[in-house]
Image: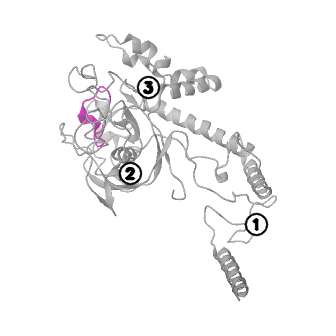
């Protein structure tokens, strides 16, 4: 009897498993063997090719996943200048990736090496950071002018003297460099290609063959899944959302326990609890003539910039979203951005609904036009007020200073993580 019962149970499990397999619907991760629209087989010889399975968008080098959501964008600090250019409003930002750190000198030198090797001398010279941003008629900063960018001791310090245009050019180069490397590894099996089982080997060969069909001009086609979206500067909304990292204040359902003035809880610039209580949370200027405090454990550890992994990360795992260097964002600056905006993935690309003619730059009545870009975050030379994510300033897209750097972001495409 026991044997008969076991046979029946085994048969029921087989039927259940078969039924589950038959009822399984294709999704973007596992598309199935045949098209559900035409019935034609995917990846047949001379036929339409698509990856058999897709694990989701890979995380590019140095990137951190930022889960999107709703937040109140705008300044929480007192508007001491009375400009009212970032009034609070509720917006939603889709999920994206952002660099864990600011782009460092060594990263930019890697770019300059590639540009010098593969581009014209004219473009190479246009890509060079302006090291004279450190110079001052009444300041002895000669060491920084000569050594900050290239001396090995500054390799992991944030690159400065880079304009908004140069940051965009770097992002474009980085996209190509990363995607070419990913495609090369994918189509060649990668460095760690070990011995595979017969079925796995066939599947890998089919995927590689599909990829090779769509691989031309040194870049894989987007359909292969080996291509990341573009690296780019973050929008102002993305940057502010990532800096506040309100995910760390969430305690139940959609409730958040508090807003944040800075990328951490509270109004103090020092750690309020734990073993490192009293240590500085950011690199900033504490007052007139005070860039670091007195020598010893009570100061912020840096007179100018500091290494990109210095200071604790916020709740998204991002370093130096307040202080160290300001950071360029995508947006054109307008003081009325809070009035004319889209509440889903807002960005201001140009003078739409607020034309540059309204500001009279040609008549020297204003500095604003469609080349005026926003930068945020505060720097080693800024007081604490500018470290609040909601504060914003602007500068011409071709200008550069010793207090502005950048980091890249990337949209998160397709399936939820």
- The answer to whether residue 388 is magenta is yes
Q: Look at the numbered disc 3 and give the secondary structure of its residue.
A: loop
Front label number (3 vs 2): 3
**Residue, disc 2:** 346
Marks 1 and 2, how far apart at CA: 41 Å
Crowd around label 1: few <14 · some 14–19 · many ≥20 (10 Å): some
In-front residue for pair 399/66: 66
Q: Left or right of 227: which side holds 200? A: right
Q: Quadrant of residue 298?
A: top left
Question: Where is residue 392 drawn, in percent x and y?
Answer: 30, 38
Question: Where is residue 94 drawn, in percent x and y?
Answer: 44, 54
Question: Where is residue 110 drawn, in percent x and y?
Answer: 56, 26
In-front residue for pair 416/76: 416
- The answer to whether residue 412 is magenta is no
Marks 3 and 1, how far apart at CA: 53 Å
Earlier-in-chain disc, 1 versus 2: 1
Q: Residue at x 32, y 56 (%)?
A: 250
Q: Residue at x 43, y 42 (%)?
A: 234
Front label number (3 vs 1): 3
Residue 9 - label: none
Residue 157 - label: 3
In-front residue for pair 193/123: 193
The stretch in magenta equals: 379-392
**Residue, disc 1:** 41
Do callouts 1 and 2 mark residues in contact (Cβ within 8 Å)? no
């Amino acid at each position: 009897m026991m044997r008969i019962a076991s046979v029946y149970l085994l048969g029921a499990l087989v039927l259940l498993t078969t039924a589950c397999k038959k009822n399984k619907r294709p999704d973007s991760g596992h598309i199935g063997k045949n098209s559900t629209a035409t019935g034609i087989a995917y990846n047949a010889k001379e036929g339409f090719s698509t990856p058999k399975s897709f694990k989701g968008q890979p995380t590019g080098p140095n990137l951190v996943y930022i889960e999107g959501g709703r937040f109140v964008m705008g300044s929480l600090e007192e508007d001491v200048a009375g400009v009212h250019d970032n009034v609070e409003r509720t917006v939603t930002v889709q999920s994206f990736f952002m660099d864990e750190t600011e782009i460092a000198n060594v990263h930019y030198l890697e770019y300059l090496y590639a540009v010098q090797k593969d581009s014209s001398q004219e473009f190479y010279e246009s890509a060079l950071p302006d090291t004279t941003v450190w110079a001052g008629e009444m300041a002895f900063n000669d060491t920084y002018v000569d050594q900050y960018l290239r001396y090995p001791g500054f390799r992991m310090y944030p690159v400065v003297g880079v304009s908004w245009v140069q940051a965009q050019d770097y992002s474009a180069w980085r996209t190509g460099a990363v995607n070419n490397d990913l495609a090369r590894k994918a189509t060649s099996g990668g460095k760690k290609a070990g011995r595979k089982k017969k079925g796995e080997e066939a599947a890998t060969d089919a995927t590689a063959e599909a990829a090779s069909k769509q691989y031309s001009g040194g870049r894989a086609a987007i359909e292969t899944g080996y291509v990341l979206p573009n690296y780019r500067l973050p929008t102002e909304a993305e940057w502010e959302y990532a800096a506040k990292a309100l995910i760390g204040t969430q305690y139940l359902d959609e409730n958040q326990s508090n807003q944040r003035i800075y990328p951490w809880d509270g109004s103090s610039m020092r750690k309020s609890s734990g073993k490192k209580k009293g240590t500085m949370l950011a690199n900033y200027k504490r007052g007139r003539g005070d860039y670091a405090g007195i020598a010893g454990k009570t100061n912020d550890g840096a007179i100018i910039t500091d290494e990109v992994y210095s200071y604790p990360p916020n709740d998204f795992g991002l370093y130096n979203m307040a202080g160290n260097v300001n950071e360029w964002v995508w947006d054109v600056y307008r003081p009325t951005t809070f009035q004319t905006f889209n509440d889903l993935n807002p960005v201001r690309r140009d003078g739409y609904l607020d034309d540059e003619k309204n500001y009279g730059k040609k008549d020297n009545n204003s500095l604003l036009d469609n080349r005026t870009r926003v930068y945020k975050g505060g720097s080693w030379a800024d007081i604490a007020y500018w470290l609040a994510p909601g504060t914003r300033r602007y500068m011409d897209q071709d200008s550069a200073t010793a207090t502005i750097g950048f980091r890249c972001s990337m949209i998160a495409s397709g399936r939820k993580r």
